[in-house]
Amino acid sequence: DDNQMKDPDMASAVAAIRTLLEFLKRDKGETILGLRESLTSATDCLTGVDSSVAVSSGGELFLRFISLTSLEHQDLSRCKKVMEERGELFLEKISMSRAKVAKLCHTFIKDGAKILTHSYSRVVLRVLEKAAAEKKRFSVYVTESQPDAAGRQMAEALRKLNVPVTVVLDAAVGYVLEKVDLVIVGAEGVVESGGIINKIGTYQMAVCSKAHNKPFYVVAESFKFVRLYPLNQQDVPDKFKYKADTLKTVQNLSEEHPMIDYTPPSLITLLFTDLGVLTPSAVSDELIKLYL
Amino acid sequence: MTKEEKQRLRKEKKQQKKNKEKKDDNASQESEKEKKSVSSSSSAPQPPTQPATQKGGSSCCSLKNVHDMVQKVTLILIFPVVKRLPEHIQVDNPDVLKKLAKKLERQQIPLRLDYGYKVSLFSHLHQYSRKAPLTQQLSIPSSVIHPAIVRLGLQYSQGIVAGSNARSVALLHAFKQVIRDYTTPPNEELSRDLVNKLKPYISFLNQCRPLSASMGNAIKYIKKEISNIPSQCKEEEAKGKLLNCIECYINEKIILAAKAIAKYAIEKISDGDVILVYGCSSLVNHILCEAFEKNRKFRVIVVDSRPRLEGREALRRLVQRGISCTYVLISAVSYILPEVSKVFLGAHALLANGYVMSRVGTSQIALVAKAFNVPVLVCCETYKFCERVQTDSFVSNELDDPDDLIVTRKGKTQLEDWQQVPLLGLLNLVYDVTPPDFVDLVITDLGMIPCTSVPVVLRVKNVDL
C-alpha cells in the first residue's frame, strides 16, 4: 500500500512483489521450508488487503521463480542470497514487461483507427502512448466504467497525450461498436483456459464485439497468468469478485455488486503479452511452461 | 519439346532399360556364382580361380548394391512415399485381407469372418457376430495361445469385460499370468523371445475385439519394459521385475490417476449442482461417489441409450451410494438440459488434435449442451492420450453385432429377418468423436487443461519417456 501510494504508475501486483522481496530480505528464518511458508503467508496477507487476481498470481509466480533454481547450498544465507538475486531479476523483468507489450501491440493500431477501451488500464495507456509517439492518428472511446468511474481517469490521461477521446456510458457499448475498428482491453488476470478476468463490463463488450465481428484484443503482462479455470461467471471465486473490505464486513454477498467478470476465450481474438502475441489456446501452453 | 530433345529422351530411356537388363543379368550371374561358391566351398579342394572370381564377384556385388540404393533414393524423391493405412480399417481391400489371413495362419490363430450386410459408409470396418466367438474355432487345449488370454478374448467378445479401464486392467492381469507361466526356451533371450510370444496373443485379442487406444498404450509400455531387460538378468529376477512394472503401471496410471482426477473434479462440483452423465464411465462414477462422500449436495441425471443400456449400471452404482438420480433416454436430452448445471463425460481416448473419442452419443450430448450454454467437462487419464488424429467418426470406428438392434416388444420381433431384406442394413456403432469446441474443460491427472492442450501433454510425456 505504501509502495502504491508513492508510485501510482506501478501495478498493485508489482508493488506486492516488491514488498515480498523486502520481506525476504528481512526474514530471519532458519530453514528453506520455513522461508517458503512465511512467504506464502505474506502473500495471503497481501491478498487479504487487496484482493485482486494480479496480486495473488504475481505472488505465486514470484515464489515459483525464486525457488526454480538449485537450492542445494549448505549455507542458508547463500541460498537466501540466490533467492534474493532471482527476486531482483524477476522484478526487473516485470518492470520491462509493459514496454515489451507496448512494442508488440502498437503495430496493430492503424492510422485513422477508432479504438474502444474499457475503464482505466495502465497497460492500454502505455500501448496508446507508444502508438501516439509513432505519429499515428487515432481516436478513442472509453466507457465510464461505474461504480468507480475509472473511465474518466483514463480519458484525462489520454487528453494529456492529445488523443481525441470520448467518454461513453457503459450501456452505450453496443451503440458505439459500429463506429469502432478494434477493441483493446487490459486484464487483471489471465486464466488457464485463455480467458481473462477484468473489470465488470468487459464480458458485455466482448460479446458485442463478437456480434459485430470486431477484433477484441487483450493486453496483459505475463505475471498476471493465474492457475484458475472458471467454467462460467459463477465459478470465479468470491475472493476476487468483491473488494477485500467488502468480504470482511458484509454478510450477504448476493446483494453486493461484483467488481470483475470473466470473459471466455472464444470471444478473444489475440492476447498481447511480454511472452509474445498469443492466441487464447496458446495461453495454456505458456502456463504449463511457467508453472510445471 | 524439339525433335532432338525427344530423341535424346528416348535414347536415355533405352539406355536405362539396357542398364536394368544388364544389372538383372549381373544379379542372376551373381546368384549363380554365389550358389557355385557355396557348393564348392563345401567340397574340400578349392581351385585357385574360384577365390579370384568370388572376390571379383563380391566387389561387383557391393557396387551393384550402392547403385541400387542410389536408384531407389532417386525414385523415392520423384515418387513420394504414401503412409500406409492401418489394416483394421481396410477390410474392403482384398489384398489386405489376404495378407491378414496369411499372417494369422502363420501365427496359428483362426480368422474370424465378417457377419451380415455392412452399410456402405462403414464397409471398411470389421463387423462380427457375438454368436460366433473366435474361441469356438480353437482346439482345446490350445497349444499356441495361453488359456488366460483365451479366457480374456472370450470375455471381450461377449461383452463381459467392457469399458476401457476395465479392459486395460484385465489385459494387464492376463499378461501377468502369462509372464508367471513363461519359461525361456534354451538358446533364447527373454527380452526377445517374450515379445515374440506376445505377438500372436495380441493378434488373437484383436480378432476377438479390436484393441482400444488405452490397451494399445499399455502394450507399448510392456513391450518397452521387456526389451529393456538386460541380458545378464536371471529369469526369476527378470520375471519379478516385469510383474512389478505392470503392478506399478496399473497403480499409477489408473488407480492413483483416478484419485488425482477426483480431487480436481470435486473443486468444480458445488452445492446445488445438477450433473448430467452419459452411459457408464468408471471414472465419472468414482468422481461422483467421492464428491458425495465429501458432503457435496448435488443430484445426477443419467442419460442412457440403446442397445447397450450401460446407464442402468451407472444408475445402480450411484443409487447404491445414496445419490439422488434421474434416468432418461438420450432422446429426452434437450428436454432436461435447461435444468442441468454441468455435464460430466468419460472418454475412451483423447486424440492428438484435441478431439474426444468416446461412446456413441457423447458428441450429441456435447452439442446439445453447448447450445444450452452448459459447461461440458471431460475426465480422462493421461494413459488414454493417443497420437492419432481424427476429425470424423467414419475413418476409424468399431462396428458391433448388428443383431443387438433387434428387440422383442409385446411378443413381436420386427427386425428378425433383416438379412432377407436385400437393401436393409443394421448399423451398430460403438464410438464417436467430439470436436474440441464443444468441450470446455478436460480434467486429467496432470491438472485441468483446455481441450486444445492435449498435444502439449503428449509432448511433455514423450520428453519424460
Image: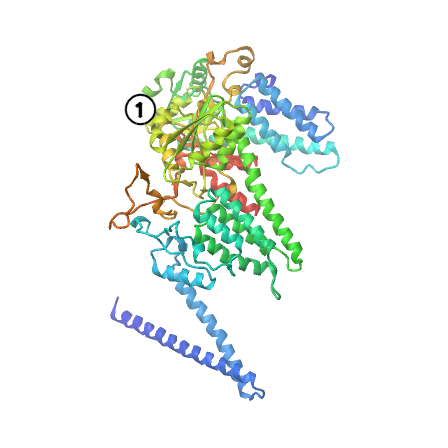
Of residues A246 and B152, which is closer to you in this image?
B152
- At x 51%, y 41%, the residue is B382
Quarter assignment of residue A175: top left
Q: Which quadrant does the N terminus of chain B fall into?
A: bottom left
> Is residue B323 depicted above or below B382 in this figure?
above
Colour convention of the picture: rainbow
Q: Farthest residue toward the front? A: B411
- At x 58%, y 41%, the residue is B252
Quarter assignment of residue B431: top left
Q: Position of residue A66 (x, y in %)?
A: 63, 32
Q: Amino acid at mark 1?
A: Glu
Q: Position of residue B139 (x, y in %)?
A: 47, 60
Of residues B129 and B295, which is closer to you in this image?
B129
Q: Position of residue B48 (x, y in %)?
A: 56, 88
Of residues A220 and B406, which is closer to you in this image?
B406
Tag 1 residue:
A178
- At x 53%, y 28%, the residue is B291
Q: What element does badge 1 sit on?
A: loop
Q: Position of residue B16 (x, y in %)?
A: 36, 73
Q: Residues within 10 Å of mark 1 (few under 14, many from 20)?
A: few
> Can residue B122 be seen by looking at this rendering?
yes
Circle 1 chain:
A
> Can residue A137 be seen by looking at this rendering?
no
State left or right for residue B174 relative to residue B28: right
Of residues B113 and B462, which is closer to you in this image?
B113
State the count of labels.
Answer: 1
- At x 41%, y 58%, the residue is B111
State left or right for residue B204 relative to residue A15: left
